[in-house]
Amino acid sequence: MIRVNIPAAVTLKEFKYNAEAEIVNPLADTLATVTFQGADVDWFIKAEDIVLNNKDGHTTENLQNHK
């Protein structure tokens, strides 16, 4: 499982179970923790938002970064 972090300022969205969604401007990163047997690595993704895909495969919102 990979955790996806979305800013708290983004409004709550409720999607149906197994609905296809797209992550807006994702940034994948890792966090390593030293253990006695080596290291544990946790993967996570930071994103600006998450949007539901339409049936034709396009997202319902504009994904272009206007910054």
Image: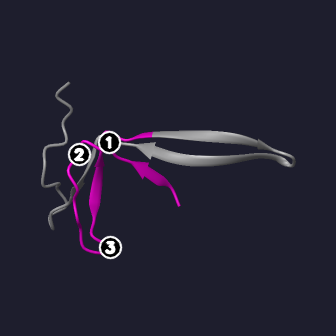
Secondary structure category for the residue under label 3: loop
Query: Mark 3 against mark 1, which lies toward the viewer?
Result: 1
Mark 2 packing: few (<14 Cα in 10 Å), some, or many (20+)?
few
Quick check: marks 3 and 1 in contact, CB under 8 Å? Answer: no
Identify which residue is drawn at 66% across, 46% down. 41
Name the residue tied to disc 1: 7
Residue 58 percent coordinates (x, y)? 17, 56
Identify which residue is drawn at 71% across, 42% down. 33
Label 3 to label 1, Cα distance in Å? 22 Å
Name the residue tied to disc 2: 10
Q: Is residue 66 above or below residue 19?
A: above
Residue 18 lies in the magenta-colored region: yes
Which comes sooner in the sequence, label 3 or label 2? 2
Span shown in magenta: 1-27
Residue 22 percent coordinates (x, y)? 28, 54
Name the residue tied to disc 3: 18
